[in-house]
Amino acid sequence: MAAYISDRKYLGKEKIVVAMDIGTTQTAVAYAHLYPQALPQVSLVTQWPQQAIASGSAKIPTLVLYQNGEYVTCGQEAVKKMEDDMENTYSVAKWFKLHLHPETIKASRGPNSPPPLQIPDLPSGIDKERVYIDVIKYLFINTKRHFVEKTPGGVAIWDRLRSSMEFIFAIPNGWDSKQQNFLRQAAIAAGLVSSSDAAMQINFVSEGEASVHFALAYGSTKAWLEDGMEFAVVDAGGSTVDSTLYTCASMSPELELKEVRQSECVQAGGVSVDDSMKRILKERLSGSNFDDDESIQSIISAFELKTKRLFTGSGDSNETFGGKRDNDKSRGIIQGKIVLSQDEIASSFNDAILAITHSINTLLQGRTIRFLILVGGFGESPYLKSKLSEIVRSKGATIVTAEQPTKKAAAEGALIWYVQKYVKARAVRATFGTNPLMLYDPSIHSERSRLAYEDREGTKVVSDSFQMWVQK
């Protein structure tokens, strides 16, 4: 797959950098062999076990398979084993990224929020730490295999640079130090780095910042970006939609961006549509022979693979989920196919679109933009794009996309971020300060006069004060 090549030489020490984007439904890995005085080139891992090489896709399903409490495999290989498992001996961990989301993301869907997402349970006896360790190991093993096969002298280069290798994790805008530490510990346990080197060799970048680097690398930036312009980036992924507002501080001699205000992160990604469709189907099929988890999940899987990705806002759709003997004409099921109406399909998108709209409106309140960059797997949905276009047009702006549908923006964008560092200033996400002793001032500290006392020099001071360094 064509890869990004930087326009400026790398001046640091020789190293290999690996970027991982472990998404809710799709996962991808990118890497770069950085060499002094050479132009950095980013490569995507495009060959995975049981995945058709001709597909050219850098994405694999975010699935981790277990059997009797033991790890089996991940990705497309997990899909294949489940398809061949006639006795249901496997259990699968899916959507496990949702177990890490802080309450601030879960509660950010705006007014009239729909019911919270139904997060699938992890396999019995398996916790989220174990799942992340297993998936990170799988990604790293296959990244090494891809590197040594595609790089001349790859084995020697990998072995020589293994101890100094750096890693980048792309994470939702709404994640903080708690989630970062969780991933750091998982990476250590997976053998990526030692605990003593983790602080220096593991990096984190928000999905929003990774995505803006990806979009500017592949989009027609020079056709619309100019000094002083404000623009938004919306990364619509599997579980979250991250929205960030930037201003172009400079175009020359090199591009410089500044984050205007705190970014938004809402739990309204592609799985929200699946979850809404599941509720629609449960109501529609209630009391029928198809009112069971297996039948409904089969319909959801068919819906996700075709209709959800292609729906434009008009037309019904047939979803094949069973055999010719599966019939219930009163429920619209004929020979293993169910007809989903246009209204049902559109309704499954409504909750997500309302939450995303609220998030974008919050981000853009009081600001004027001319362009909104839309990226991410869910961002490829023509229906979502058309609905967001209506919102953006009402604000006098236009949607811009990076036409790289088989790629995962955050993985490659994380490495472009590492090389280019376009963003020079970020909005503060919390108020920072310290609690020093302060000179007692009755006009300020009267309510805490009981905490005032004289220090060794006889000066009256008060404790438990707050001296602000920077305000949110």
Image (cartoon, rainbow, N blue to C red):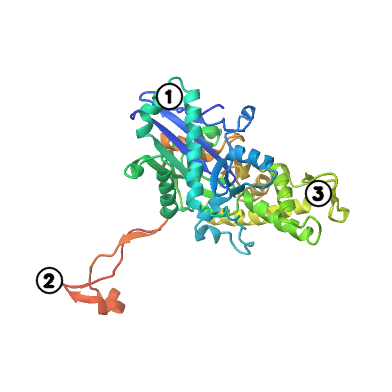
The mark closer to the camera, 3 or 2, is: 3
Residue flagged by tag 3: what amino acid is it?
Ile
Q: Nearer the viewer, mark 1 or mark 2?
A: 1
Compared with residue 51, is residue 465 higher up or lower down, i.e. above or below? below
Seen at 55% across and 51% down, the residue is: 96
Q: Which mark is residue 459?
A: none
Query: In the picture, residue 399 is in which quadrant?
Result: top right
SS class, disc 3: strand
Q: Earlier in the sequence, mark 3 or mark 2?
A: 3
Q: CA distance from mark 3 to mark 1?
A: 51 Å
Q: Residues within 10 Å of mark 3 (few under 14, many from 20)?
A: many
Query: Could you tell me if residue 106 is visible in this image?
Result: yes
Q: Are marks 1 and 2 in contact (CB under 8 Å)?
A: no
Helix, strand or loop status at disc 2: loop
Instruction: Mark 3 and mark 1 in contact? Answer it, CB < 8 Å.
Output: no
Residue 342 lies, with reference to residue 414, above or below; the image says below
- Which label is found at residue 155? 1
Q: Which residue is mark 3?
A: 338
Residue drawn at 23 percent across, 67 percent down: 437
Question: In the figure, is residue 236 to the left or right of 152?
Answer: right
**Which residue is nearer to you in this view: 43 or 471?**
43
What amino acid does circle 1 point to? Val
The numbered mark at residue 456 is 2
Counting other residues with Cα less than 10 Å from the Cα at mark 2, is it few (<14), some (14-19), or many (20 or more)? few
In this rendered view, identify the residue nearer to me: 221 or 341. 341
Q: Amino acid at mark 2?
A: Arg
**Chain-order first, disc 1 or disc 2:** 1
